[in-house]
Image (spheres, rainbow, N blue to C red):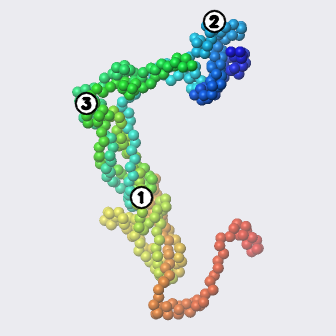
Amino acid sequence: MSQDLYDLLGVARDADADAIKKAYRRLARQLHPDVNPDPETQEKFKEVSMAYEVLSDPQKRAAYDRGGDPFGGQGGGFGQGAGFSFTDIMDAFFGGGAPGAAQGRGPRPRVRRGQDALIRLEVDLAEAAFGTARELKVDTAVLCTTCNGDGAAPGSHPVPCETCRGAGEVAHVQRSFLGEIRTLRPCAACRGFGSIIPDPCRECSGDGRVRSRRTLTVKIPAGVDNGTRVQLTEQGEVGPGGGPAGDLYVEIHIAPHETFTRHGNDLHCTVSVPMSAAALGTTLTLPTLEADVESGADSGVETSFELELKPGTQSGTEQILRGRGVPGLRGGRGDLVVSVIVETPTKLDARQEELLRELAALRGEESPTGQVRPGNKSFFGRLRDSFNQH
């Protein structure tokens, strides 16, 4: 290697150990064969690694600075010096030792928490507004009562794995241009558990849980909306090995209502009235959402209300009835917004047409010219009109 080792790492000759280590980490990330398989890059990586092996060892660095052989005449090939190891390579990528180099992770636990479960439930608008209780049939994993989650047949028990001797991992040694690489992998014999069940439970096949259909009661609070999720703690899937159950989430979907539509906590409905009723005024009797509740009529709850339309009510008029909407999850209650649509008759008999023409004559409306009303003006238009008025 003819190039100066300090130049290879891009550090000054008086650089401390931390600066040398940081420089090597940066170059190793760029030049490692797993990142860049180009042959020239691999050769460059070997040279950089050789430079780091020398400059990271105080004794070899001192020998190099004096112009001597840093490897003491032992050849100096990459990976042949006593100070370089695979841990240094892994340290360049992860900032620490190679995974499993110092100590293994140990066996995997057989007992683990179960997964959460999600089911969708359709409810009526009144049920969502005022709350209800519903029974659900759910199909989830439950604890195996034959082995009580142990996974072993009655009278037997798990035994330590002879392959990994209970460690759950086995060492694999591989030689490469990096040197001798030692890694730990999950034991294939016991799948990393460290123990083997020689006689699995016939009911659950050693899993410690079985699938079963059961009935649950879910309480739906008043005021839930589409997409609201009700959480049932520990009612989800039982975990492997009889581990604790996950949670069950019930997602609410509200069925369309024939009269009301919901916008937040407000209810909206539309009523149609004849032209004559809108002109003369009238009183309508309309149902409330409480009318959909089975016990509404017997509990003294108001299931209808009277809506008064004043004479001359126009189509598109809205009336807001405070506090007749949907209760909120955190208290309060929305409003009921009633929109009025005035119906124009499409078919008239001779007498009706005669009377309507007489009314038009009395009101001077036989030949109306129509009134064109300006649309919404822009801000500058309104500003111009205000100046013209002054």
The reply to whether the C-beta atoms of the residues labelled 3 and 2 are less than 8 Å apart is no
Q: Position of residue 236 (x, y in %)?
A: 36, 42
Q: Is residue 20 left or right of residue 134?
A: right
The amino acid beneath tag 2 is Gly
Foreground tag (2 vs 1): 2
Q: Amino acid at mark 3?
A: Ala
Q: Residue furthest front?
A: 39
Say which of 99 and 40 sits in front. 40
Viewport quadrant of the N terminus:
top right
**Spatial distance from mark 2 to mark 1, Cα to Cα?**
83 Å
At 50% from the left and 93% from the top, the residue drawn is: 354
Query: Residue at coordinates 71% horizontally, 69% vertically from top-left?
Result: 382
Q: Which disc is residue 73 wearing?
A: 2
Between 16 and 226, the one nearer to me in the picture? 16
The image shows residue 352 at horizontal and vertical percentages of: 47, 90
Report the Cα–Cα distance between label 3 and label 2.
64 Å
Q: Earlier in the sequence, mark 3 or mark 2?
A: 2
- Compared to 143, does 271 lie above or below? below
Query: Who's the residue at 61% across and 87% down the image?
Result: 368
Which circle marks residue 153 in the picture?
3
Query: How many C-alpha atoms fall within 10 Å of the one at disc 3: few (<14), some, or many (≥20)?
Result: many
Instruction: Identify the residue under disc 1.
Output: 254
Look at the picture and state if 113 lies above or below 283: above
Q: Quadrant of residue 52?
A: top right
- Label of residue 63 in the image: none
Q: Residue furthest left?
A: 155
Q: Is residue 322 left or right of residue 31?
A: left
